[in-house]
Amino acid sequence: MKNKIVLFSSDLQYAGVPMALLAVTKLLDKKENDIKIITSAEYPKYKEEILAQCEGALCFGISCISGTPIKSAIEVSKMVKEKYPSLPIIWGGWQAITLPDVTLQEPYVDYLCTGQGERTFSEFIRMLRENDFGSIDKIDGLSYKNNGVITHNNRRVPEDLNSFPDFDLDLIEWDKYLEVTDFGNNVLRIVTSYGCPYRCGFCCEPNNSKRQWKSLTAERIISLLKKIRSKVDFDGLMIVENNFFVREQRVIDFCNGLIENGFNIKLGQVNGRTNKLVTYKESTWGLLKQAGLHDILIGAESANEETLRLINKDATVEQTYLLSRICRKYEIKLIASIIVGLPIPAYFSENSQDAFDVEFREITKLYKDLFLLDRNNRLIIFIYAPLPFSPMYERAIELGFRPPKNLEEWGNYDLTETHIGWISKKNIVKVQALVYVSSMLAIDFKYLVQKLPIILRVFVIPMLGIANWVSKLRLRYDCYSFPLDSYMFYAALKLFKRLNKTYKFINITN
């Protein structure tokens, strides 16, 4: 008789492929295990499905990132633990890695899988299947309660991803994860690497992966994409990982593989670093364009050189400008993310309003310069959200940040909202207005509009036209106060999301 393993992705707003859950199944013997992956995209009534599938299961596993996905993870964990009190519940993902003690102290969490999960989870399943709890301390990367005492085994050393087999493609219905974006109607999200070799001071990834980076070879990626295409037709890929561009030769081989195999797709939101990308050969950039690269997402982080040095970015503002010029040459869009409110010396030593004014002027100048280089360039701006075990975390606490005290409070820690006191509500409005302007001027909404019913298009098309026109005026006159137009737009967007949740016009990540 097969052992049933039930896995759940707790990020209800995420419409993409549950790559983390698929990854941890790679070493599980399909002859011995019946694996059930549950997501809100595939199962709108996911709670009922979880309870039904957990009957007679060997374990229930949850993939959970920090922030609001913790809420749904807590809810379903309590629900399962109440109905099946003896069923082992194991959490994995960033939340488990970043705050293991906070997570494991809750009565509805029995185990944590921390770090690279493929081998840890397979050894955990073997232990449960064989009832071999005497070997629990030998499973690297596993945390658990030993007579009520939280115990962390040795960290697992990340392995070469190419040493693992591919996951079983039949574990999910691939068509449920096709998304509409600004570069395609049927876009899939994939992950081709683990970890990050860099040392950004605001990020907890250096603690999570210990600055190690493991990647699939280009040949393995192309092979996997061929298999996926046999299941579902897609016209674009979002490569959603920390840094796709670490090794130039892998990128060259990947592009050649796409071209030689006639994929004819677009690649979007591919994450990279300016200091690396500006060193790429011209021939590589030509290949990237030929292979279908639509846009690159970079962590510019700041428009101030001193701030970049403080956060150990190992990149410069000038490299952001240089990369923009390269992208313009090859007609590739640049999306630059910026963080406002990092705990820099100015917020310690000056009036916080004065510090913000200087920072905001630098950011708006950067955006104007990038816009003049290429009108398709776009800024994404985040208000700094302190993350545990990142080097800047203690500085944030010194500046007045009060971290959540328990898991439920961390569930209210929305990474898209503001949790720092040195950025006022008035200034948050200005930041949001700049993001709105950048989005209206850079995003091509044609694929999204094409998917809408005609009755909605009648309202949406004129609204987008007006929003674009007003955004140009705001950019020209540096006017980011009293953004009534953005309020109206986001109110309409909120209404659309409600309708879309009911009628499912398009599949997008909220």
Image (tube, rainbow, N blue to C red):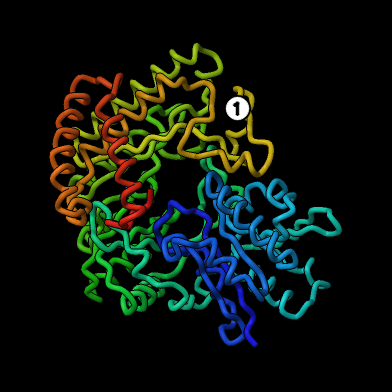
Residue 177, percent from left and from top: 37, 64
Relative height, residue 84 to residue 430 (above, below): below
Seen from this angle, which residue lies furthest right?
147
Instruction: Answer left or right for 362 relative to 395.
Output: left
Quadrant hosting residue 123: bottom right
Q: Between 436 and 156, which is closer to the camera in this rendering?
A: 436
Quadrant hosting residue 204: top right
The answer, for residue 89, to whether it is visible in the render is yes
Relative height, residue 278 to residue 290 (above, below): above
> Circle 1: is it few (<14), some (14-19), or many (20+) Cα within 10 Å?
some
Quadrant hosting residue 2: bottom right
Q: Residue at x 36, y 53 (%)?
A: 501
Q: Residue at x 60, y 22 (%)?
A: 399
- Looking at the rendered structure, the kind of residue marked 1 is Phe
The residue that mark 1 highlights is 401
Residue 190, percent from left and from top: 40, 63
Instruction: Answer left or right for 181 relative to 112.
Output: left
Q: Between 113 and 410, which is closer to the camera in this rendering?
A: 410
Relative height, residue 3 to residue 252 (above, below): below
The answer, for residue 141, to whether it is visible in the render is no
Circle count: 1
Q: Residue at x 74, y 64 (%)?
A: 85
Instruction: Answer left or right for 305 relative to 115.
Output: left
